[in-house]
Image (spheres, helix red, strand yellow):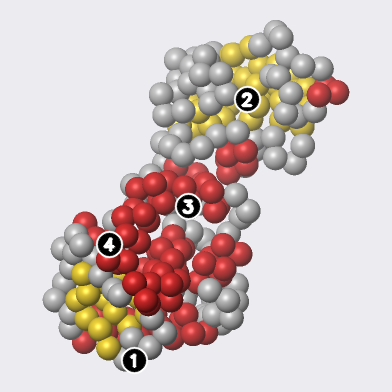
Amino acid sequence: MYKLTRPNGFDFYTSTINYRAAMGTTIRVTDYDPPEKGPCGKGLHASRNPNDCFVGAEIPCAVFKVKGVQPIAKDRRKTRYQALKVLEEIHDLDALFGWKYSEVIDPIHPLKIKPPEIKEEHVRLLKEWALALDSVSNSGWDSVWASVWNSAKDLVGTPVWDSIVASVRDSVATSVRASVWNSVGASVWDSVWVYMSSFFPNVKKWKYVDHAPGVNPFQSGVDLWKMGLVPSCDGTIWRLHGGPDGGVLWQGKL
């Protein structure tokens, strides 16, 4: 069983129980609710699947392996106990969760990377990105969102939004005419979400798009992002933005 806490080891709900300090011991509560209150009642909660722990936790976090003692109630995602024995702290959270926790808490901001001089290889990647979007029946956002578990939007999207999305949006918006921002904005959101697709290497089939099994069909967009380049399109003209102000480094028809 697994328990998620705040980075300092204290529980999310009350901030009074220090799981790190309790390593090797058993934490017990006496004022727990009766079984009729169900799995969400007062007590100590843990989950067999570490990703299910995010029902009552958030990013960033610390993770502890625990042994449940005297179960009270449970559902498919968590069990409520009278006590938890703290066995160990898990440090390789990327391996534990099966997605790139380390990058979610420290996402790549493309406009803080010195962009390359635009060459044929970058335009080639842009063409691949345009073709990938063209093959998706909905948007890149829809494909990524539909391909990962239900809580991923808020769980992963919130830290990325807080640290990079707003500034990327504002910078790109100031580098194009206001009259085309609505159409350009949609392609920028697609870039953000396909960058997030790289957080989930275990997804073998992305919805709404045909691709080779196990291959991320949006990898060209991910590659551009990690080079410091943000694509946009107003429906006719494609652009590559980069640098602190999100300026246009290349534009043209594909």
Residue at 51% x, 19% y is 15
Quadrant occupied by the C terminus: bottom left
Residue 28 drawn at (x, y percent): 64, 12
Going by the numbered disc 2, the residue's amino acid type is: Lys
Indicate left or right for 254 with 186 as reference.
Answer: left
Q: Nearer the viewer, residue 190 or 220?
A: 190
| Mark found first going from the N terminus, 1 or 2 | 2
Query: Looking at the image, is mark 4 or mark 2 nearer the viewer?
Result: 4
Q: Which residue is mark 1?
A: 254
Query: Residue 218 occupies which quadrant of the picture?
Result: bottom left
Residue at 46% x, 39% y is 59
Residue 130 drawn at (x, y percent): 41, 83
Query: Residue 213 occupies which quadrant of the picture?
Result: bottom right
Q: Which residue is mark 3?
A: 157
Asked if labels 4 and 1 touch by Cβ distance under 8 angstroms, the answer is no
Asked if labels 3 and 1 touch by Cβ distance under 8 angstroms, the answer is no
Query: Residue 109 occupies which quadrant of the picture?
Result: bottom left
Q: Which residue is mark 2?
A: 67
Going by the numbered disc 4, the residue's amino acid type is: Ser
| Mark found first going from the N terminus, 4 or 2 | 2
Mark 4–mark 3 distance (CA, rounded to whole Å): 19 Å
Q: Secondary structure at mark 1?
A: loop
